Image (spheres, rainbow, N blue to C red):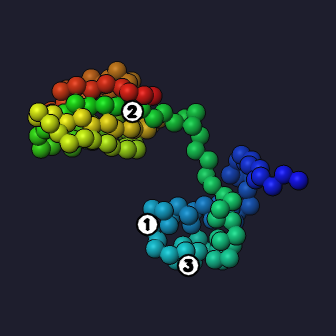
Amino acid sequence: MNSYPKYYIVEASALPEIFLKVTEAKRMLATGEVDTVNEACKIIDISRSAFYKYRDAVQPFRNMNNSRIITFQFLLRDEPGALSNILAALAQHNTNLMTINSITPSNGCAVVTIAAETSQTSVSLDEMLRTFQMTPGVIKVEVLAG
């Protein structure tokens, strides 16, 4: 008999309440809202044994069809506030920052790669790129992936 786990995608309203409570407790722990499993379980009103029984079996589903992750590469002037200006522009367009990578600046320039989740933005990619290009400190911006 095959011992590999089987997975199903089930709409949340069809799940037993305990599964939803366990995922909420896991979210609270992951975000730092609570420090301990015991604290999360008290707030959510479940037993610790139920939490431990289901914690590895229940995961929220992230619909990748509604998600769009774009990787941008910026060439920035090596000056204070350049990266902060980019982050403010990302926030202005309601994007969710996923990762930031940079190399040590040389010749007055820094290369920064940023992956951002853009499913909630209301502007086009072209408009976003225009905003970035006009952002103080940006020399060049391009899309690497997405």
Q: Which residue is rendered at x = 52% and y = 61% of the image?
A: 27
The residue to which callout 2 is attached is 71
Q: Which residue is rendered at x = 64% and y = 71% of the image?
A: 51
Q: Mark 3 vs mark 2: which is more N-terminal?
A: 3
Q: Amino acid at mark 2?
A: Thr
Q: Amino acid at mark 3?
A: Asn
Q: Amino acid at mark 1?
A: Gly
Give the alpha-carbon distance from disc 1 to disc 3, as whole Å.
13 Å
Position of residue 93 relative to residue 33, above or below, is above
Q: Mark 1 vs mark 3: which is more N-terminal?
A: 1
Which of 24 and 84 lies nearest the eye of the viewer?
Answer: 84
Position of residue 38 measured from the top left corner of the image (x, y, whole percent)? 55, 78
The residue to which callout 1 is attached is 32
Report the disc number at residue 144. Answer: none
| Quadrant of the image containing the C terminus | top left
Q: Is residue 78 left or right of residue 43?
A: left
The residue to which callout 3 is attached is 38
Q: Residues within 10 Å of mark 1 (few under 14, many from 20)?
A: few
